[in-house]
Image: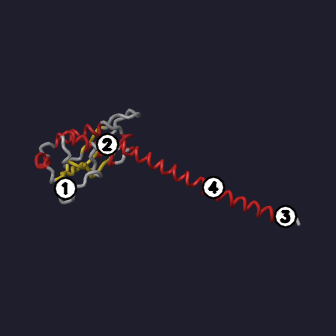
Amino acid sequence: MRKNLLSVIIIALLVVNIVMTAFMMFTVIPANKKTIALVGDVAAAMNLELTDPSIMSASTVNVSIEDTVTYDIADEMTILLRKGEDGKDHYAVVSVTLYMDGTSDDYKKYGADVTNKESMIKDEINKAMGSLTIDECQAMTTDEVQDIVLKRIQSMYGSTFIYKVGFRSIMYS
């Protein structure tokens, strides 16, 4: 008799468990879906606010490979970075390539003159990267550092015909 009573109690608890699970499925999950949708909407709204349309990066510009003109700055540049918390001098050694839109009117205006302006471009690269500490450089991705340099060069020309800056090599010490 005890075995049967114990079996009946276990079956009753099993049925109660199934009923409560079904109740949770029908009440909690739809509310959870609404919460997930709300979080997704808030994240989308925040992403729109954080995106700065004035920053032209390689990911936002679509220039075909046939229309791309590259210019390699021949010299490897050694740039003194801003002193960090450790107070020591740190350097970045970079080799830079500029990607230009060959179909742009500004390319026709400035493109042939890039070699004559190389020292000005190097100065802008020095200023852009020299404003960063080694910790900031290492915390950022290479694309983020390239976008900082790109923004500086684009503001120098007042144009976006240079649409991407590439580092053939980069090393921090």
Which residue is drawn at the image coordinates 72% and 59% (left, top)?
A: 16
- Which of the marked residues, 4 or 1, is nearer the chain's N terminus? 4
Disc 3/disc 1 C-alpha distance (Å)? 83 Å
The disc, 4 or 3, on the residue closer to the chain's N-terminal end is 3
Q: Rounded to the nearest whole Å, what is the CA distance between mark 4 and mark 3?
A: 29 Å
User: Mark 3 or mark 2: which is in front?
Assistant: 3
Residue pointed to by mark 2: 52
Residue 132: x %, y % from top left: 33, 38
Crowdedness of circle 1 by 10 Å Cα count: few (<14), some, many (20+)?
Answer: some
Assign a secondary structure to mark 4: helix
Is 147 placed left or right of 156 in the picture? Answer: right
Of the two numbered discs 2 and 1 in the rendering, the one whose residue sits closer to the viewer: 2
Three-letter code, disc 1: Thr
- Element under label 1? strand
| Rendered image: mark on residue 5 | 3
Picture coordinates of residue 9 (x, y %)? 80, 61
CA–CA distance in space, label 2 to label 4 = 43 Å
Name the amino acid type tagged 4: Met
Helix, strand or loop at label 2? It is loop
The circle drawn on residue 24 is 4
Distance Cα–Cα, label 3 vs label 2: 70 Å
Indicate which disc, 2 or 4, sits on the residue closer to the N terminus.
Answer: 4
State yes or no: discs 3 and 1 in contact (Cβ < 8 Å).
Answer: no
Label annotation for residue 68: 1
Mark 3 residue element: helix
Residue type at mark 3: give it. Answer: Leu
Return the disc, 3 or 1, that comes first in the chain's sequence. Answer: 3
Quadrant in the picture for the C terminus: top left
